[in-house]
Image (cartoon, rainbow, N blue to C red):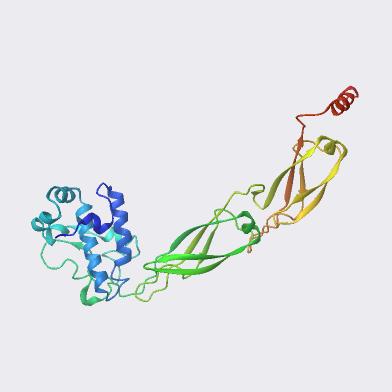
């Protein structure tokens, strides 16, 4: 019984061209002979997924495959038919495997009429197809951290899938990092080709929203409500800081709604290696107007109104 090309690529029969290409890319990266030298099982798997892609990526061949079914299709179409004018250069170039014209390359991936094994050059004598070492592919990882972690720095343990293996690594997140920054970990990407250096790992940092603090550059902002009398007469209030401590600040008499009080040096430290100094924390004051008052309080307010306040 012939292989089901859709199952071979792990895709649905309604998959579009982009989904087919994406599935093949993922499997080709996993089973390519340069990543599995001498591995006969991987070699056969690579041949099968390449055959499936050669058919399903071609609209006419795909139509014939679906009309005849896998068994009849395999009887009607030879390997030469399936791979005729089939060029893998472009898709494999995306993986860092180069193209047919690359230096050091023995043979290309364009399979043309003429008989023989279309993979003979690729798997010749079980040797990888590159004579010079090549750097491995880079890895990209999206990492979310809390605002507190971005301010004080932290250490994260990550589990990364590289090929068929899971690798655990520890990463130090520097104090002062912000959303959009990238951290590069040299040599933590995919293994190199022909003993070439491994690729790098790039961490894309995203800082999660905080329930009470907001960050703008290296400054921290927090909002605190005070009573009308505190605003008029002046007072002192306790304010939490991003480092977890509680500080008492003075509210000057006559403070207006929306006033920002600066707490110097309680913001975010400058990222190591930059010229940015540590930021500040700003407390935005909002005056709380009571919704309900008793009779005595109302009388006092009326007297203040009569006094022109």
Does 147 sit above or below residue 160?
above
Task: Please provide percent x and percent y for residue 36.
Answer: 30, 72
Task: Please provide percent x and percent y for residue 144.
Answer: 54, 56
**Front-most of 141 and 293?**
293
**Front-most of 131 and 177?**
177
Identified at 49% across, 62% down, the residue is 202
- 180 horizontally vs 176: left or right: left
**Front-most of 239 and 253?**
239
Residue 173 seen from this side:
no
Does 37 sit above or below residue 229?
below
Of the 4 image quadrants, the one containing the N terminus is bottom left
**Farthest top residue in view:** 306
Task: Please provide percent x and percent y for residue 165.
Answer: 39, 69
Q: What number of labels is visible?
A: 0
Identified at 24% across, 66% down, the residue is 45
Identified at 77% across, 32% down, the residue is 290
Of the 4 image quadrants, the one containing the C terminus is top right
- 218 horizontally vs 250: left or right: left
Figure quadrant of residue 303? top right
Task: Please provide percent x and percent y for residue 80.
Answer: 12, 61
Residue 256 seen from this side:
yes
Identified at 9% across, 58% down, the residue is 75
Figure quadrant of residue 301? top right
Figure quadrant of residue 133? bottom left
């Amino acid at each position: 019984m012939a292989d089901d090309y859709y199952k071979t690529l792990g895709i649905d029969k309604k998959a579009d061209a982009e989904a087919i290409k994406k599935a093949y890319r993922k499997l080709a990266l996993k089973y390519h002979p340069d990543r599995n030298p001498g591995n006969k099982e991987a070699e056969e798997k690579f041949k099968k997924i390449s055959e499936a892609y050669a058919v399903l990526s071609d609209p006419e061949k795909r139509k014939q495959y679906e009309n005849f079914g896998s068994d009849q299709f395999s009887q009607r179409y030879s390997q030469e038919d399936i791979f005729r004018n089939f060029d893998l250069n472009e898709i494999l170039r995306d993986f860092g495997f180069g193209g047919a014209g690359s230096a050091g390359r023995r043979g290309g991936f364009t399979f043309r009429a003429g008989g023989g094994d279309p993979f003979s050059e690729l798997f010749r004598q079980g040797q990888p197809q590159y004579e010079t070492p090549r750097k491995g592919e880079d890895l990209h990882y999206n990492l979310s951290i809390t605002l507190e972690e971005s301010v004080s720095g932290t250490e994260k343990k990550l589990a990364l899938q590289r090929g068929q293996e899971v690798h655990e690594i520890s990463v130090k997140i520097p104090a002062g990092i912000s959303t959009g920054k990238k951290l590069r970990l040299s040599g933590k990407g995919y293994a190199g080709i022909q003993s070439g250096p491994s690729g790098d790992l790039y961490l894309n940092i995203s800082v999660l929203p905080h329930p009470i603090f907001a960050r703008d550059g290296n400054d921290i902002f927090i909002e605190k409500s005070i009573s009308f009398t505190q605003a008029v007469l002046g007072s002192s209030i306790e304010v939490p800081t991003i480092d977890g401590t509680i500080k008492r600040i003075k509210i000057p008499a006559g403070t207006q709604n929306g006033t920002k009080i600066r707490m110097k040096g309680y913001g975010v430290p400058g990222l190591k290696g930059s010229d940015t100094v540590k930021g500040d924390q700003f407390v935005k004051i909002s005056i709380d107007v009571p919704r309900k008052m008793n009779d005595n309080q109302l009388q006092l307010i009326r007297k203040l109104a009569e006094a022109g306040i």
